[in-house]
Image (cartoon, rainbow, N blue to C red):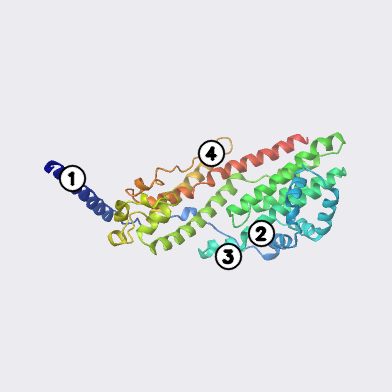
Amino acid sequence: MKKVLIVVGVLIALAIILVVGFLIYAKLNSGDIAAPDDSDLALVIKDIPKEENSYYDLLSASQKLYWPEDKKDTLDKISNGEEWDEALVADILAKNKETLNLFDKTSQLSQFQDPDFVNVIKNSYYDPNAPAGNFYSSLRNLAKLESIEANSFFRKKDFKGAISGAIENMRIGNILENSQDGSPISYLIGMSIKKIGIANFGGIIEEAKSSKFNLAPFSGDLENLKVDEKSVAKNILKTSYQYDKVNLDATTREIKAVSLAGIYQEVLFSSKISDDSSKSVFYDFLTSPDLLGKSSFYYKPNETKKLVADNYRRDIRNIESGCINIVSEQGNSKGYNFPVKSIFIKNSVGKMLADMTDILHPTIFKKLCEENAEIDNLIYSIK
């Protein structure tokens, strides 16, 4: 019995030494690095006069759009060419004449700049009440409306009208991809709208050729709709970095306002622990606000910004390899999402946040290259 007590005493002493040793280690490593120099990722945003900014006509068109919710699925299929309902198409086109005119007008402009996103960059603040979501989802429906009109022309063998509609969608997609705010959402919606136009154009070619319709004159229009992959991708990445900086600053403010226990509960443990019994006394002890308070051992704002910036720099370097040798590296989680490991890793919260920002951008350049290749295929097909 005496030996058992000795062993237990030794184990308890070792545990105390380990905990105290870790607390000392955490305290000694609680400092942060100096604010990183990210001037190479700075973004220059030029103000666009309202009359030259397609945003306002697109906003007006989205507000006037008639797109009944109960017919949404059918309209999607009609847009894709999977179904056709003459009466519904006639009704939709008749009720959207003004909307289509605004969409046509928009395609004649060459620039797009969302003032809400510009404010994020200029003021380093994101307004969560900005109605971006509804506007951008409506843009996809506007493109589908244009596609329905193009399909209507195609069914009447009006190939010129059908091609004009396809090119119009591609042109507006192009404007959004080259937006002056460079926001990821503008790029993604632009790409999806452009794909609708590309699909429309591709579906016209075979029948137009069999009807002896001359498609060759449209090759120049298609060539002009290709993007400068490197320039667009770099712009999107730099803008995305600026948004991430804004979000990281907001995260820093929130983390500094709560205890370390709160950080672990909300960030490290997330929803993985549902059983309260899993939260051991050891966990409570380690994360006690009284012991560690607002320690920066687990979250270092400047070090995190440097990790995020380095991810963006890596992807910008990869762009230089060109479309033929696309390198698509992505940040890999190094175990920081495992609660037990995270307890002993410096800046574990920051490393997880850096990984979370590295989801979309490795694919941006690849998608732009693929899009240009699709347009090249269209040009080849109409010769």
- In the rendered structure, which disc, 1 or 2, sits on the residue that comes first in sequence? 1
- In the rendered structure, which disc, 4 or 1, sits on the residue that comes first in sequence? 1
Q: Amino acid at mark 2?
A: Phe
User: Which type of secondary structure does the marked residue at label 4 adopt?
Assistant: loop
Q: Amino acid at mark 4?
A: Ser
Q: In 3D space, how far apart are the residues under numbered discs 4 and 3 (Cα atoms)? A: 40 Å
Relative to 324, is 349 above or below?
below
Residue designated by label 3? 129
- In the rendered structure, which disc, 3 or 1, sits on the residue that comes first in sequence? 1
Q: Is residue 307 visible?
A: no
* Percent coordinates x, y for residue 47 in the rendering: 61, 63
* Percent coordinates x, y for residue 376 in the rendering: 70, 38
Residue designated by label 2? 135
Residue designated by label 1? 8
- In the rendered structure, which disc, 4 or 2, sits on the residue that comes first in sequence? 2
Q: Which mark is residue 226?
A: none
For label 3, count other residues whose C-alpha is less than 10 Å away and answer few (under 14), some (14-19) or many (20+): few
Q: Which mark is residue 321?
A: 4
Numbered-mark total: 4
Q: Amino acid at mark 3?
A: Asn
Q: Amino acid at mark 1?
A: Val
Apparent side of residue 352 relative to residue 85 in the rendered image (left or right): left
User: Which type of secondary structure does the marked residue at label 2 adopt?
Assistant: helix
